[in-house]
Image (tube, helix red, strand yellow):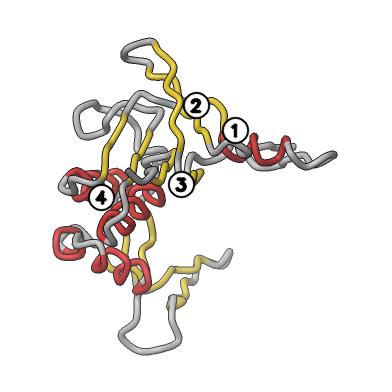
Amino acid sequence: MAKPIIIAGAGLSGTLLAVRLAQRGFEVELYESRPDMRATDISAGRSINLALSDRGLRALEMVGVHEQVLKDLIPMKGRMIHHQTGNTHFQSYSGREGEFINSVSRGGLNIALLDQAESFPNLKLFFNTPCVHVDLEAGLAHFHDQSANRHIHREGSLIIGADGAGSAVQGSMLARVPGCVSTIGRTG
């Protein structure tokens, strides 16, 4: 049996990628540190909506959630500039007539992608299971199943980090490069 592709992080990017890989016939395991947002009232990670362009809509169409998401889109044609004098000026997001970007709920979009992911028999979802370390030489990802309070070691044909700033996958990669320090997620 082939080793699965392991993805750490079931946010927008990780879930979209997992669905796309499952569509292409790969065995995929998708791990998320947070609870399942469809069953628990948790933050989607950001308080503001996502601006979704035509390219994003095409990606959603490829994974089969385009029609579901379309009904919740809010067109954003541009921004209103407010001058100190009190005058306003509309500035289009595009120089071409009829083009615009769309506002969509990050959480709602993530839920639609998770629902789609769950429909694939070759894609397994694991929640409350953060990645704690990756052994790059051995191709092993180490997770902590918080629900069962046990460690899980999974060997993958490919390990992908989509677990954001402070990622265990990123940390494992950076640890291999002498003198390399990540600035992702740092302020100041």
Circle 4: is it few (<14), some (14-19), or many (20+) Cα within 10 Å?
Answer: many
The amino acid sitting under disc 1 is Asp
The residue wearing badge 4 is: 113
- Tell me the SS state at disc 4: helix
The amino acid sitting under disc 3 is Ser
Residue 157 is marked as: 3
Q: How far apart are the two marked residues, 3 and 4, measured between alpha carbons?
A: 23 Å
| Residue 61 percent coordinates (x, y) | 24, 68
CB atoms at circles 3 and 1 under 8 Å apart? Answer: no
In-front residue for pair 167/22: 22
Q: How far apart are the two marked residues, 2 and 3, measured between alpha carbons?
A: 14 Å
Q: How far apart are the two marked residues, 3 and 1, measured between alpha carbons?
A: 13 Å
Of the two numbered discs 4 and 1 on the same chain, state the one appearing first in sequence.
4
Of the two numbered discs 4 and 2 on the same chain, state the one appearing first in sequence.
4
Q: Nearer the viewer, mark 4 or mark 2?
A: 2
Q: Nearer the viewer, mark 2 or mark 3?
A: 3
The amino acid sitting under disc 4 is Leu
- Tell me the SS state at disc 3: loop
- Left of 173 or right of it: where is 167? left
CB atoms at circles 1 and 2 under 8 Å apart? Answer: yes
The residue wearing badge 1 is: 135
